[in-house]
Image: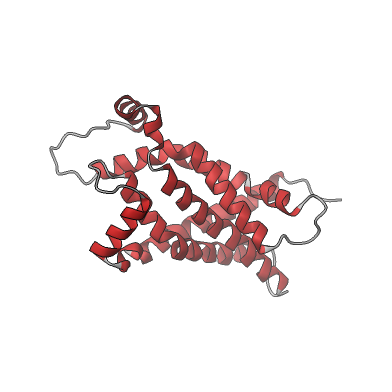
Amino acid sequence: MHRQVINGGLRIGLYEPVRNFYVGKDFKGDPPLWAKIAAGLTTGAVAICVASPTDLVKVRMQSEGVLPPGVPKKYPSAIKAYGIIAKETGIAGLWKGLGPNVGRNAIINAAELASYDQIKQSLLASGIFKDDVGTHIISGLGAGLFAVCIGSPVDVVKSRVMGDNVGKYTGVLDCFLKTARQDGLGAFYKGFLPNFGRLGSWNVTMFLTLEQAKKLFTPKEE
């Protein structure tokens, strides 16, 4: 909940203003693809720089979820986890793994938002589709597919680096090389179908909600 409110609010809320800033206030028509990708990368990076501690706590608590029954858990709750981590490693420790986290969030955010924007624009330009729920669903599923295909490798590396409490990896590149060498390249796409199911449904829900909110709060042109 903490992560989605902070990270989601920033990366999605800032996307259109940043995209429009890149093309300039005098630009007319649909923004080009490069502006959409640049805006997605920018807002994804900015958002996770603020929300990275919430991601760290999420990963740590998920790691404890696989402990055998009877083994005491280190983090009794998400709120207390922030304090425990800060006490053990300092405030800066809450931003452990920021590098791979920024890379992961920027890439997936650009894949989601830019691809949704581009797919929707292409569908509307075809003259066959209208700006309605059906178009939003198709665009959302396409955005989820792009996000999984592009973001899975960095997602795997990010999770392993942030969940590393024993110093197994010295950094992002070391984690990538060890994972490829020990588990094979397929490890970067392990769980592809359930991951697509998760991201696909998430994107459909998110963009449907976003589109309805935009219609509700955006003043209609006279």
Q: Residue at x 53, y 66 (%)?
A: 142
Residue occupying the far right of the picture = 222
Number of dots carrying numbers: 0
Of residues 213 and 85, which is closer to you in this image?
85
Colour scheme: secondary structure
* Residue 144 place in picture, x, y as percent: 49, 62
Residue 69: horizontal and vertical position, in percent? 14, 41
- Horizontally, residue 31 falls left or right of residue 102, namely right
Q: Nearer the viewer, residue 108 or 170?
A: 170
**Residue 62 sits in which quadrant?**
top left
* Observer-nearest of 12 and 33: 33
| 219 on left or right of 167 | right
At x 36%, y 29%, the residue is 82
Q: Residue at x 54, y 48 (%)?
A: 44
Tell me if 92 is positioned left or right of 134 in this view: left
Whether residue 109 is situated above or below residue 48 in the rendered picture: below
Residue 5 appearing in the image: no
Among all residues in the image, which is located at the extreme left?
70
Report the residue at 48% width, 61% height from top: 147
Q: Is residue 72 visible?
A: yes
The N terminus lies in quadrant? top left
Q: Is residue 172 above or below residue 120?
A: above
Q: Residue 210: image x %, image y %? A: 61, 50
